[in-house]
Amino acid sequence: MTGWVAVAGLGPGAEDLITPEVQAALDQASDVIGYIPYVARVAPRPGLALHPSDNRVELDRARHALALARDGRQVVVVSSGDPGVFAMASALFEALGDDPAPEIRILPGITAMLAASARLGAPLGHDFCAINLSDNLKPWALIEKRLRLAAEADFAMAFYNPRSKSRPEGFARVLEILRESCGPERLISFARAVTTPEEALLTVTLAEARPEMADMRTVIILGNSATRRAGRWVYTPRSA
Amino acid sequence: MTGWVAVAGLGPGAEDLITPEVQAALDQASDVIGYIPYVARVAPRPGLALHPSDNRVELDRARHALALARDGRQVVVVSSGDPGVFAMASALFEALGDDPAPEIRILPGITAMLAASARLGAPLGHDFCAINLSDNLKPWALIEKRLRLAAEADFAMAFYNPRSKSRPEGFARVLEILRESCGPERLISFARAVTTPEEALLTVTLAEARPEMADMRTVIILGNSATRRAGRWVYTPRSA
């Protein structure tokens, strides 16, 4: 049988947000590779080898997937959310190298910011940006620069990976920069473990926001200058 | 029976990218409301009323959905892609007004830029922004300002609604600004009718890009300064 790699997005957590396309790839796979909690979301079955691995070994994982596919295996690399948003798709291409590539497919999923936006209302209803707050792979100064320019552009903003154990002070600094750039009344929403039984949603002003409102399971959405509340909902008008 | 409104994303076109959550809402609906080509994607069945309407009547459509739900109907408002990204979710909240709201759910879908990114590789693999290029509801000067600031921030960028009949010259101007801000070698991808039988993908440099490469069924992805090719794929490294 011909080998292939599919990099698939499992969505934010709920079973009924996994696309039929991704489910079909999992049903056809001989091997599933990914970060431990994501592989744990795949149902075991005879003939399916599960390869859970630790965080921060994305390139090793990608090379492993490519090697298995070159050996004729049918490999699904699982990401949560969408594989193209701060996840495994880029790592796979970084690992390709000069050897002939096996068949590759990227299978999109519901990314955390859009699941969070749906649960909150429509805070990303107009122009917005998505920023990874982790400085594992880029300099902190670049994060600060992007925050200030995005605020000047009056984008709504979604933040991934807000708090890391190795740099707990980073997110406090992010909140300072946002308060300076956007003012204390701007709305900010913390969406934790969206669409899972542990889901928790909180919307406050920047004046009220505290670093401990976020952890590594939280995606954060900052409104733009026109974002407002309507009852329990938060939305950004289409004209902003 | 209690009325409700669900604003649901049908994804970019392929049937197997519709989430089970959205399919379940369609199966329970008494009424489906939306722009003509999106309502045409919903299978008719006895007991289901289809309400197709023209483009640019989003607020009327939202008021209609709310009125039906207040009358006890089970209403799905359909958007293509994700309802929270340049689609009907914001319009629904704009239309809420002060009357008691019926039960509302926003059901996420695969938005065009993430489907396009998956088909192209991983061009949105690091920090990025999404900009609606239509000036129906915002001043053109704001679009230009956001383009220049996003370029300065070195975001990858996704552009929705690149060419309108009422302003065909707008996108030519966008390409000029991007060439000035990002240089002629930056990669830009045109993804038309992604995941449908009419899908067409094209990646060129900004020097080679022409306005007629886009129409209203095209989503456009501009790389950041580190975006590169790998064989037939385009991706942005995780460290950029």
Image: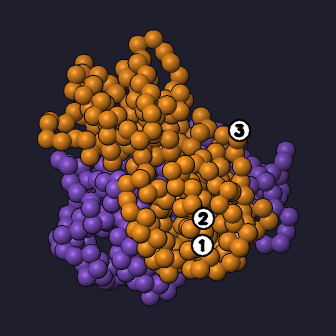
Chain colours: A purple, B orange
Residue drawn at (24%, 78%) of the image: A179
Q: Which of the 4 image quadrants contains residue A112?
A: bottom left
In the image, taking residue A79 as reference, residue B208 lies left or right, namely right
Q: Residue at x 71, y 73 (%)?
A: B207
Amino acid at pointer 2: Ala
State which mark lies toward you, 1 or 3. Answer: 1
Q: Chain of mark 1?
A: B
Look at the numbered disc 1 and give the secondary structure of its residue. Answer: helix
Mark 3 sits on what residue? B197
Q: Tell me where residue A125 appears, x and y as whole percent.
A: 37, 54
Q: State which chain disc 3 sits on.
A: B
Residue B68 on image: x %, y %: 27, 25
Crowd rating for badge 3 (residues with CA inside 10 Å; few <14, some 14–19, many 20+): few
Task: Return the x and y of residue B205 as percentages of the image width and height.
Answer: 71, 71
Asked which quadrant contains residue A174, the reply is bottom left
Viewer-nearest residue: A42 or B54: B54
* Image depth: mark 2 or mark 3 in front: 2
Q: Position of residue A78 (x, y in %)?
A: 59, 55
Determine if marks 2 and 1 fall on one subunit: yes
Q: Earlier in the sequence, mark 2 or mark 3?
A: 2
Q: Mark 1 vs mark 3: which is more N-terminal?
A: 1
Residue indicated by mark 1: B176
- Chain assignment, label 2: B
Query: What residue is drawn where x is 32% and y is 24%?
Result: B74
The reply to whether residue A227 is visible in this rendering is yes
- Residue plotted at (31% across, 54% down): A237
Disc ID at residue B172: 2
